[in-house]
Image (spheres, grey):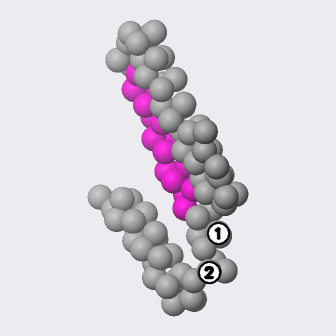
Amino acid sequence: MFLVKDKVVFGMAVMRFLSSMIELTAALLFLKYDSIEKALKINALLALIGPTVMTVVMVMGLAGLSGRISFNKFSIILTGVVLIFWGVSKK
């Protein structure tokens, strides 16, 4: 099916796959319970899982790149990631 050469890419893909399965399960639970209150509770849990998965995947990717790119480029990428989280957290 797919030939994976890089273990980091495989790990990142597995994390995203697991995240999508969690999202799909949540959607099915919405339909099963058929309740706005329960759907909001499930959605609140998803709000915790999403950023966690993004952080884990980003750290895996940065760890995989750390030996291949210069320190300056690594710093710029890391600054961008920090700015994303800072921008999202501001009200």
Q: Main secondary structure of the magenta part?
A: helix
Binning the other alpha carbons within 10 Å of mark 2 as few (below 14), some (14 to 19) or many (20 upward) gives few
Image quarter (top left, top right, bottom left or bottom right) of the C terminus: bottom left
- In the displayed image of the protein, which residue is found farthest to the left? 91
- Residue 70 x %, y %: 57, 88
On the question of residue 56 being in view, the answer is no
Q: Is residue 51 magenta?
A: yes
Q: Is residue 22 above or below residue 56?
A: above
Amino acid type shown at disc 2: Arg
Which residue is rendered at x = 42% and y = 17% of the image? 30
Part of the protein shown in magenta: 39-58
- Residue 84 x %, y %: 39, 65
- SS assignment at label 1: helix
On the question of residue 2 being in view, the answer is yes
Amino acid type shown at disc 1: Gly
Image quarter (top left, top right, bottom left or bottom right) of the N terminus: top right
- Residue 72 x %, y %: 51, 90
Q: Which mark is residue 89?
A: none
Q: Is residue 72 above or below residue 21?
A: below
36 left or right of 62? left
Between 78 and 88, the residue placed more toward the observer is 78
Q: Which residue does the numbered mark 1 point to in the structure image?
A: 64
User: Could you tell me how far apart the alpha carbons at marks 1 and 2 are, in whole angstroms?
Assistant: 8 Å
Q: Which residue does the numbered mark 2 point to in the structure image?
A: 68
Which residue is rendered at x = 61% and y = 57% of the image? 9
Which residue is rendered at x = 67% and y = 58% of the image? 5
* Residue 69 found in image quarter: bottom right
Residues marked 1 and 2 touching at CB (< 8 Å): yes
Q: Is residue 87 magenta?
A: no
- SS assignment at label 2: loop
